[in-house]
Each structure stands twice: as C-alpha cells, then as structure tokens.
Image (cartoon, helix red, strand yellow):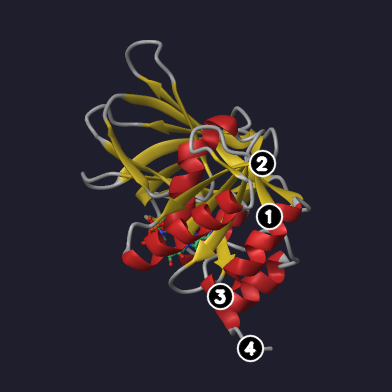
Amino acid sequence: MKFAVTSKGDTKSNQLKEFIIDSLTNLKMIHNEAEPDLVISVGGDGTFLEAFHTYNHRLEETAFIGVHTGHLGFYADWVPEEVENLIAEITKNTFRVVEYPLLDIKIYPKNGPEIERFLALNECSVKTPEGSVVLDLNIKGEHFERFRGDGLCISTPSGSTAYNKALGGGIIHPSLESIQITEMASINNRVFRTIGSPLILPKHHVCELKPIYDDRSFLLTIDHITKNYTNVKAIECRVAEEKIRFARFRSFPFWKRVHDSFVSDKR
Ligand code: NAD
C-alpha cells in the first residue's frame, strides 16, 4: 500500500509524521506523496481539510485518516498514543471504507465562459466586505427568496457540525446525501423577508445564488480557503457526485463523535 502523511507543521505534528513514515516504511509500506492509497493527516481538522484539498483530484483511489495532536477533531479522531496501534492496523490492510457526501460548487462569471468548480468537505460560505449580501436564492430552478444579510452558508452533512452549527443549523447524519443552507443575520422586516430557518436539500436539488448588484465583491470560503470574487453571475451548489472515503480501523459512530465533541468526552 502507498501512503502519504501530512502535518500541521508544529514540532509535535512533524515528529509524529516522521515516526509514522519511518514505521510504515520499515514495515514495507510505500511512502508516496504523489499517489497515495492512504493519506494520514496529523494535526487537527484544519490539517485534515488541507489534506482533503491536496488530494481531492483522486478521491476514488484515496482513503483518509486523521490523527489529532491538539483537541479531539471531528475528522482527526486518533490520538498520538494510539498511533502504534494504528500502524499495526494499517499493515494488516484490513480497513473498512466509509463514504461521506461532499458539496459541489460552481462559480459562473458575468463575462466569459470560464466556470470554476470546487469540492468542499465542510461548507461554502458567501459573504461580502461591502455592506450586505443581496442575492436571489433559486432552488431547483424556482425563485425561493431574495436574501439580504451577512451571508449564506451551504454545508455538507459532515460539515453540519462546523460553521453551520454555529449559525443555528441542524446536525445531519452523513448517510443522508444532502446539503444545508443556513442564513447569517438576514434582514427581516416589513420590506425584506427570508425564510429564517435552515433548509435541507436532497441530492439533485440544486441551489443557485444570483447576486443582484454588479458592483459588489464577494468573499467566498470553501472550507478553510477564502477567495475574493467580483463579477459573479451565479453560484451553484449541489450534492457532489464524488465522495470522501475514510479509512476506518475501529468503530467511532457519527453520533458518538458528536457527543464526544460537543457534550462530554465521558459517558
Ligand atoms: P479554525 O482554526 O478557525 O478552526 C475551526 C474549528 O472548527 C476547529 O475547532 C475545528 O476542529 C472545527 N471543525 C472543523 N471542521 C469541523 C467539523 N466538520 N465538525 C466540527 N468541528 C469542525 O479553522 P480551520 O481549522 O481552518 O477550519 C476551517 C473551518 O472552520 C471551516 O470549514 C468552518 O466550518 C469552520 N469555521 C467555523 C466558524 C464558527 O464556528 N463560527 C467560523 C468560521 C469557520
């Protein structure tokens, strides 16, 4: 099996990365950063998101696993003390693959045919540095509402416990192929009206965000990455055809992960 290891870059994560590379290489696993079958991310959820974006061009061939060197991560759920165990499990090559849905984002520019496409593991958020975001929200080709406010967040089920949760969105089990739209401080009064509740869309229900004003720029976040755009004609979001594959060497069910991250790490 070919493996790659990514690190957050701090001393502890770098040392653990070197230990994993040395141990797996001694056990005849092939260290291959370009075309790994297994990517081991060492650090936190941010490191895991970076690893996902580094290897998201070969999702069908790659499985991911996360080790955390800080607090328990949602994706980075192995602790450094378990790493020797993990290495032994990897050499047995007996992991189960669990797939989670991703978000497909397409950005259509006003001028020119160049469409940009991204995949997000957590979410895409749309904000502006200039006043309020004003856009039409279309769902499945039908106008749903005109949104005015700080912005919108469109998240995956596994991202529902991240930014989406802080915005009052619901937590969605990743077996539900869906995306969730949550509002950031929408303006609601007698003149302006939005639904006010998070919306959960199933697969194939595309949501389209169409900016109203030509002169506004947008801050688009795709997971940990922030991009600045002007001249956006539309942003289209849907459940992606691609999925992320997690290598599971032991059971850690989603609701236990939610419990341990947000309620208590003791039962
Ligand atoms: P960061 O360093 O600000 O970390 C954000 C926190 O989010 C970390 O504690 C991380 O463990 C946690 N996190 C990431 N993905 C998660 C998930 N799927 N479920 C539960 N917790 C999760 O930023 P970063 O490390 O670059 O991560 C980027 C992510 O931060 C974005 O994808 C977004 O979801 C999140 N974020 C959250 C808020 C908020 O909660 N108010 C605001 C902005 C961004």
Q: Are marks 4 and 2 in contact (CB under 8 Å)?
A: no
Determine whether the residue tagged by mark 4 lies in a helix, strand or loop: loop
Q: Earlier in the sequence, mark 1 or mark 2?
A: 2
Q: Are marks 1 and 2 in contact (CB under 8 Å)?
A: yes
Callout 3 amino acid: Glu
Which quadrant is home to the N terminus?
top right
Q: Which numbered mark, 4 or 1, is in the foreground of this view?
A: 1
The answer to whether residue 170 of the structure is visible from this angle is yes
Question: Which residue is label 4 attached to?
Answer: 266
In this rendering, is residue 214 above or below 174? above
Callout 2 amino acid: Met
x 63%, y 71%: residue = 258
Q: Earlier in the sequence, mark 4 or mark 2?
A: 2
Quick one: 139 or 237, which is closer to the camera?
237
Q: Which mark is residue 1?
A: 2
How many other residues sit within 10 Å of disc 4, few (<14), some (14-19) or many (≥20)?
Answer: few
Q: Which mark is residue 90?
A: 1
Which quadrant is home to the C terminus?
bottom right
